[in-house]
Amino acid sequence: MSDSVFGPRIIQNLLDTDFYKITMMQAVLHNYPNAEVEWEFRCRNGENLAPYLAEIRYQVEQLADVSVTHDQLAYLEKIPFIKPDFIRFLSLFRFNLRYVQVGLDDAGQLAIRVRGPWLHVILYEIPLLAIISEVRNRYRYREVVIEQVRERLYQNLDWLKAAASADELAGFQLADFGTRRRFSYRVQDEVVHILKRDFPGRFVGTSNVHLAREYQLKPIGTMAHEWFMAHQQLGPRLVDSQAAALECWVREYRGLLGIALTDCITMDAFLGDFDLYFAKLFDGLRHD
């Protein structure tokens, strides 16, 4: 099928993803290259996405043609903690469609299941979610145009400037983490562009690696819940899994990327593991 049947290809390049997928992928390469994982997509609000199945499947199939370019690899090489062997691996990486199944479950709801080597399926998550979101929005909000997005964003920026003092704005830092739930790629691109140029506080960067590269912004991200969830099955006792995940991260990045995620099990459980040893090894915490 061609782009005339469905919309244009949504995921255009490998770096159109969140930065923490890249950082976790490197850690997986070095520590768990043979680990097998499985995950599935579930729509939290129960919305019926079955009418969009054909285009979602088509867009997922297009991922097989996505690869990283020499210019993108050169960009990643400049990041101090991205290692040469990972760059070489990424240069060979392709989305393998045999690891993903897209269809309907017994209840007639959209069902997507990914199963395979963690190293080879870790990059599927963000593109799949971005595809589902954009395809769904193409059908539900056909009348929305980029000018409306721009107008609404500037309304919010004007409200912020009116509501906050100059001192408050000077200390107000904002980052974009919108890739997985974006209205569309074009909308996220426009929002990041405007925020870099006109945000009245400090726009400190974006989790989207491609957009960070395009707009000379800092790519932001360290680890996701996925890192801790996988460690619950990677060998240590469940009670030791968070400490094992934190320890492995420290060994991989040696003091860099030092923001730990707090709440995969519970905050109390995390604080029970995050003792003085880890407090001295990490720079800070992120609560989601």
Image (cartoon, rainbow, N blue to C red):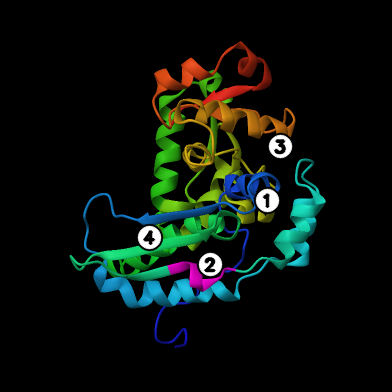
Q: Quadrant of residue 249?
A: top right
Q: Is residue 99 magenta?
A: yes
The numbered mark, 3 or 1, whose residue comes first in the sequence reads 1
- Mark 1 or 2, closer to the camera: 1
Q: Quadrant of the C terminus?
A: top left
Q: Secondary structure at mark 4?
A: helix
Q: Residue at x 43, y 47 (%)?
A: 153
Furthest residue to the left?
107
Q: Are the two marked residues, 3 and 1, in contact with CB atoms closer than 8 angstroms? A: no
The numbered mark, 1 or 2, whose residue comes first in the sequence reads 2
Q: Position of residue 2 (x, y in %)?
A: 47, 87
The residue singled out by tag 4 in the image is 133
Q: Is residue 87 magenta?
A: no
Q: Residue at x 51, y 72 (%)?
A: 97
Q: Position of residue 156 (x, y in %)?
A: 40, 40
Q: CA distance from mark 1 to mark 4?
A: 29 Å
Question: Which amino acid is tagged 4?
Answer: Ser
Q: Are the two marked residues, 1 and 2, in contact with CB atoms closer than 8 angstroms? A: no
Q: CA distance from mark 3 to mark 1?
A: 10 Å
Q: Secondary structure at mark 1?
A: helix
- Mark 2 or 3, closer to the camera: 3
The numbered mark, 2 or 3, whose residue comes first in the sequence reads 2
Question: Which amino acid is tagged 1?
Answer: Leu
Question: Which amino acid is tagged 2?
Answer: Ile
Kindly tell me whether residue 237 is visible in this rendering. yes
Q: Residue at x 67, y 56 (%)?
A: 214
Furthest residue to the top?
276
The residue singled out by tag 1 in the image is 29
Q: In the rendered view, would you say 285 is above or below 70? A: above
Q: Which mark is residue 252?
A: 3
- Mark 1 or 4, closer to the camera: 1
What segment is highlighted magenta in the picture? 95-100
